[in-house]
Image: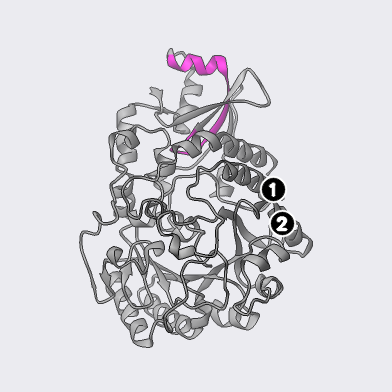
């Protein structure tokens, strides 16, 4: 047996004679005395130690076989995936005027028509012919609840359809939350609404500055009222977008949520992320000058470390450091824009060069356009961080270069941030 | 998965398992690859 290729070791804060070992492939973590770790290389482990480390993915029989397994992972996952995921962009309209939104001012009403919705339903029914067992729709926008009639129409039809095949059906909403009143939730939950993600960009004053209604009025109070009204009948997660100036205010939002009964047992997830700005498409954000051009800027490391800790120490769930499987790699994942055009990633919706057809006909061979295997190069395949990155986010590459020219390499970020993130998880797993 | 991982925590006398992690064969491609959580810079 030999050490896995995908291991990172860090000093142990509690015990200077021990190490923390983290598997980037299996996200397993151990504390091990340094002397025992050294024995691994000499093949001097006891049988029980060897069995344990093998079970955790830290010892493997052949390191080259292990690397091949990681390289072929998407092929295996696609082969056994019995689900179909469709993100539906219902409109590009919104009742908010977020300062960092670069959807731009819509030219006319860009709403999905009833006819396009019926074509979408037929598209999904055709896709299901290949023996799928579950369907998840994510309704997205713009603001999806401006198209609630279509949400009901589409979900009713597909709930009936999947039931006839004894398959599972559910849908989610990514909404600004201002229209998600109890009466709306009560209409949608019986149709399959499973969870809702709502964005709060900090406490009231901060949020209202970044995410006002179109009128300029603050939206925070309306959103919180709606969350309180609906959190007993549907799972609600909170997202938040921060920049260099706003992030220090976010812990106050967590205090506010706790004080208002929106505690970890009520909210299924809290996650804050930096606002990215397009480097080569500055015209898209003419009035907003915040945000970051890449995930490697020093202030992001500080902000992420502090905010993630604040989330975890209060007991909220936030995603662990884990393998990132981009939707573009998922052969059973589609994005349908309001006009019926098909894409592989919602961030590219509307960029015609990334359309892969429409709901009436899908083009083959989108792989080259989206650079599906761009991480299968010598450097990435040898990288210890490959399972946490797989070439990163293609849209971030696109924002940076105006095209998917190269991978969005996460090595500089993970070199700086991973130890902190892993130690946070160890600290709060201990307490759970 | 979180609950399962916590239940699986175990120790030997010298090596402390802090997190048993996940099997990649257990990874649910459709649940993890939710692109929405990966691009926070959109308007919603």
Question: Residue visible at 37% across and 61% down?
Answer: A345
| Whether residue A41 is situated above or below residue A62 in the rendered picture | above
Percent across and percent down for residue A231 are 66, 70
Question: Residue visible at 71% across and 62% down?
Answer: A203
- Answer whether residue B7 is visible to the viewer in this image: no
| Whether residue A294 is situated above or below residue A97 in the rendered picture | above
In which quadrant is the C terminus of chain A drawn? top right
Whole-angstrom CA distance, mark 2 to mark 1, is: 8 Å
Q: Are marks 2 and 1 on the same chain?
A: yes
Magenta stretch containing residue A38, yes or no? Answer: yes
| Whether residue A66 is situated above or below residue A258 in the rendered picture | above
The residue indicated by pointer 1 is A310
Percent across and percent down for residue A431 are 70, 41
The residue indicated by pointer 2 is A254
Question: Residue visible at 40% across and 76% down?
Answer: A163
Dot placed on the residue nearer the N-terminal end, 2 or 1: 2
Percent across and percent down for residue A62 are 33, 26
Crowd rating for badge 1 (residues with CA inside 10 Å; few <14, some 14–19, many 20+): some
- Residue A235 occupies quadrant: bottom right
- Answer whether residue A326 is visible to the viewer in this image: yes
Q: Is residue A192 left or right of residue A61?
A: right
Magenta stretch containing residue A54, yes or no? Answer: no
Question: Which of these two is toward me, A314 or A179?
Answer: A179
Residue furthest left as drawn: A364
Percent across and percent down for residue A221 are 71, 73
Contact between labelled residues 1 and 2, with CB atoms less than 8 Å apart: yes
């Amino acid at each position: 047996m030999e050490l896995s290729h995908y291991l990172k070791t860090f000093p142990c804060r509690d015990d200077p004679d021990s190490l923390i070992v983290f598997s980037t492939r299996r996200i397993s973590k151990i504390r091990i005395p340094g002397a025992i770790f050294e024995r691994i290389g000499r093949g001097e482990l006891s049988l029980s130690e060897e069995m344990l480390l093998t079970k955790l993915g830290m010892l493997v029989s052949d390191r080259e076989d292990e690397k091949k397994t990681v390289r072929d992972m998407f092929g295996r996952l696609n082969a056994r995936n019995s689900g179909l995921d469709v993100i539906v962009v219902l409109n590009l309209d919104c009742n908010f005027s977020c300062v960092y939104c670069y959807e731009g001012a819509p030219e006319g009403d860009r709403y999905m028509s009833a006819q396009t919705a019926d074509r979408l339903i037929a598209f999904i029914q055709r896709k299901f012919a290949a023996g799928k067992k579950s369907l998840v729709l994510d309704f997205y926008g713009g603001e999806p609840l401006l198209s609630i009639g279509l949400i009901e129409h589409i979900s009713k039809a597909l709930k009936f359809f999947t039931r006839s095949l004894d398959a599972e059906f559910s849908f989610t909403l990514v909404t600004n939350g201002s229209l998600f009143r109890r009466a709306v939730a009560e209409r949608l939950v019986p149709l399959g609404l499973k969870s809702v993600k709502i964005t709060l960009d900090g406490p009231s004053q901060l949020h209202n500055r970044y995410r006002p209604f179109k009128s300029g009025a603050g939206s925070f109070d309306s959103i919180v009222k709606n969350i309180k009204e609906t959190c007993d009948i549907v799972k609600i997660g909170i997202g938040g977008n921060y920049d260099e100036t706003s992030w220090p205010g976010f812990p106050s939002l967590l205090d506010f949520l706790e004080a208002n009964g929106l505690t970890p047992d009520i909210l299924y997830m809290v996650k804050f992320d930096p606002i990215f700005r397009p480097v080569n498409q500055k015209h898209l954000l003419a009035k907003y000058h915040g945000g970051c051009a890449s995930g490697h800027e020093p202030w992001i490391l500080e902000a992420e470390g502090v905010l993630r800790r604040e989330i975890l120490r209060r007991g909220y769930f936030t995603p662990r450091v884990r393998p990132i499987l981009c939707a573009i790699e998922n052969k059973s994942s589609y994005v349908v824009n309001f006009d019926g055009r098909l894409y592989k990633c919602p961030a590219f919706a509307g960029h015609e060069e990334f359309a892969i057809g429409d709901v009436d006909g899908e083009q083959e061979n989108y792989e080259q356009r989206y650079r599906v295997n761009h991480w299968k190069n010598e450097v990435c395949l040898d990288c210890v961080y490959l399972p946490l990155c797989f070439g990163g986010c293609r849209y971030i590459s696109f924002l940076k270069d105006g095209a998917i020219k190269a991978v969005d390499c996460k090595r500089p970020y993970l070199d700086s941030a991973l130890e902190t993130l892993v130690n946070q998880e160890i600290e709060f797993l201990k307490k759970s | 998965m979180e609950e399962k991982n916590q239940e699986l925590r175990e120790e030997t006398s010298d090596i402390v398992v802090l997190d048993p992690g996940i099997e990649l064969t257990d990874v649910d491609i459709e649940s993890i690859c939710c692109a929405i959580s990966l691009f926070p810079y959109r308007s919603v």
